[in-house]
Image (cartoon, rainbow, N blue to C red):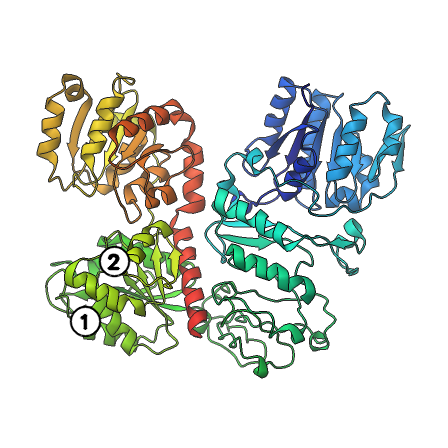
Amino acid sequence: MTLPLVLLVNPRVVRRRNARLPLSLLTLAAGLEGKARCRIVDGHFDDDATATVLAALAAERPALVGVTVMPGPQVAPAIALSKAVRERHPDVPIVWGGYFPTLYPDAALAAPYVDVVVRGPGEATLAGLLATLGGTGGAPSLANVAGISWKEGGRVVHNAERPLGPPDALPPLPYELLGDVSRFLQPTYLGRRTAVHQAAIGCRHRCSFCGVVSMFDGRTLLPPAERVARDLLVLKERHGADAVQFYDHNFFDREETTVPLAEALSRVGARAPDDARGVDGAGVDRFRLPPERPVALSAHAPADRRFRDGPRLPFSDGAGRAPPALGQDRSLRRGVVALGGRRLRPARRAARPPAGAPAEAPRGGGPVSAEAASPHVVLVNLALVPGLAAAETLDRLPGLGRFAASLAAEGARVSVVARAGEDADLVAGGVRFVAVRDGDTAFAPLSSPARSVAARVRELAPDVVHVGGLLFPVPTAALRAVLPRRVPLVLQHHGEPPGRGRLGFLQRLLLRSADAVLVTSRGIADEWVRGGHLAPETRVEEVLEASTDLRPVGRAAARAATGVDGDPAVLWVGRLHPRKDPVTALRAFEAALERLPRARLHLVYREAPLLPELEELRSRNPKLARAVRFVGPIPHADLPAWYSAADLFLTSSPSEGSNWALIEATACGLPAACSDIPANRRVAGPGTSFFAPGDSREGADALVRASREASSRGAALREHFEQRLSWGVVAREALGAYGRAIVRRGGR
């Protein structure tokens, strides 16, 4: 027996980059498991949700169309969609649920395109409604469904309320109905892939200002702690979430429930429950989590006497003042609750006031300057480029200059201190650049502490110091020695492998002084930890080392300018060097020619020590000789035409720091076949085909798979780039890591 179809629609209410998991529709679908086939249409990732719904209706008549509606901007798209459904398919029942119809059921049912309103939590109600609509009783039987309002003979009928069901009665949420779940895991101050979750149902308080009262009327139910832990493990292990934000109304409002829940979260490895509210101060000593799993407290309507004058939270006040230390229970003053690790995470950065405007005074303190409202980040570049003038450094090294400018655009004060062949002190684009004369070789002797660089860094009075690369253990230790204790030292991995011999010994000995190491993917750090080059307790943060400003150009003009051809046209951009393994790429392409006989491979490169070997491989196979084109070096500014002219991008590196070429390809909407390494997994967009590093046969299969849907992926890849890989995202990820390091050190 075929189960009836139910279409569940989440009209757009926010910008795509702010979209989160549609928990309400997922919960409804979980409640219908075994009773219906559910399809979810989310307007945040569907540019024309109405057209998608109408197409689904044309293919199969559903038992009902359910629309979730929040008051405010979601009402208008819900109306437009419902009108279109009623006009094209007048016999299909349209059901509204959510806060708007719960608060205003008569207003919703006054519309001719709304048949039924589900009031309050709808998982059990919708199941009962589905059984009624699929039966033979007709409209009068709707009177037996608790929790709905409906129309009969021109009048609105409000059925009895439905009792609140237990939160653990439903099966796990069916995330697979969303397709690519990673689209909903957004970067926040908690993590790079933040999921949302709601565990508790309802709220026991009846605050007069809150719409939750109308939904739950003071009812609340809390889930077992282990159920929450299992749900979070699904998000973490199956879908790659690295942080979670709770949408609960009162999940953390009582000590007797908060403590076991927090203990369960700690076992799962949850990073930070967001917005835990008001545990009685008597439970502070009992409530302890490891420092890397802080729990922040806030309260809207607490009963504790310390909050009668309003809550005072141990966060930065938005003007840059240092948060008070935690873990010092005896020093707690009136209005402050402190739980968890040594520090809470910093609050979101306050917007910098316009030039010349007075800074807002912090609560309980004097005025603070605009400069003090933003962290002062000092970037340290210890790799000298011989012959490069100081004035050209930031422009010629985009990984340094563009990164610094992006931090400044996000509100940080940024200075760059670099080894150079001359002394200089310049300001460019809001970034101060200090060049320190320190020899004329690219790398100083391994034992050199670069004291002159360290001294200039200290003079700048930074809030955080960021060193580019893990190849400088002695200067890193020298910086740690001269910096004040409150100033954290952060290192950025740039693709270098762990050192051997003397370098490896110094890395194992001295890199332990770093407060955090930034890597594109945590998997990259595993090799460093296994070899002892980084201590197991080293804080590892996922932060891209760079992005790109490249964007696609017109395809026809691009093909004309580049001469790129083939069906598909496959592009390689990168050095012909063993670290990029172009030999595997060429052999994979050769194997793929059996199934893609019209394909052509175009290789763009500068450094090419393996070119003779690759030319020899090409010459052995006449088909390969006709299909492979060694292009050579191309000006970077011309690369958008090459990415836009190609159909597929091929990269086969056995290891990468972040794979800038793959980032550029993604920015231009070019699908890829990639070696399956941590950096590529982090960067690659939807639909990417992966293969084992060094395996040319798997590489051929990946090329064939990627070629099947290449033309349809451009928009999704560009969207992926804007949400996950752009300079703004890189800067915000870095600032989040800096903020956490500052708090752990007790700075600012």
Quadrant for the N terminus in the image: top right
Q: Quadrant of residue 550?
A: top left
The CA distance from mark 1 to mark 2 is 21 Å
Dot 2 amino acid type? Leu
Residue 469 drawn at (x, y percent): 26, 59
Image side of residue 649 versus residue 301, left or right: left
Give me the residue at 43% from left, 35% from top: 686
Is residue 239 at least partly visible in the picture? no
Measured from the top left, where is residue 474 in percent x and y?
21, 69
Q: Which residue lies under the disc numbered 1?
A: 450
Relative to 300, is 531 above or below? above
Q: How many marks?
A: 2
x%, y% of residue 662?
31, 40
| Amino acid at dot 1 | Ala
Up-down relation of residue 10 to residue 335 (above or below): above
Q: Earlier in the sequence, mark 1 or mark 2?
A: 2
Of tags 1 and 2, the one toward the viewer is: 1
Q: Quadrant of the C terminus?
A: bottom left
Q: Is residue 444 visible?
A: yes
| Residue at 67 percent of width and 58 percent of height | 251
According to the picture, the residue beneath numbered tag 2 turns out to be 394
CA neighbours of label 1 inside 10 A, class few (<14), some (14 to 19), many (20+): many
Quadrant of the rendered structure where residue 663 is? top left
Q: Secondary structure at mark 1?
A: loop
- Can you say whether 100 is above or below 472 in the image? above
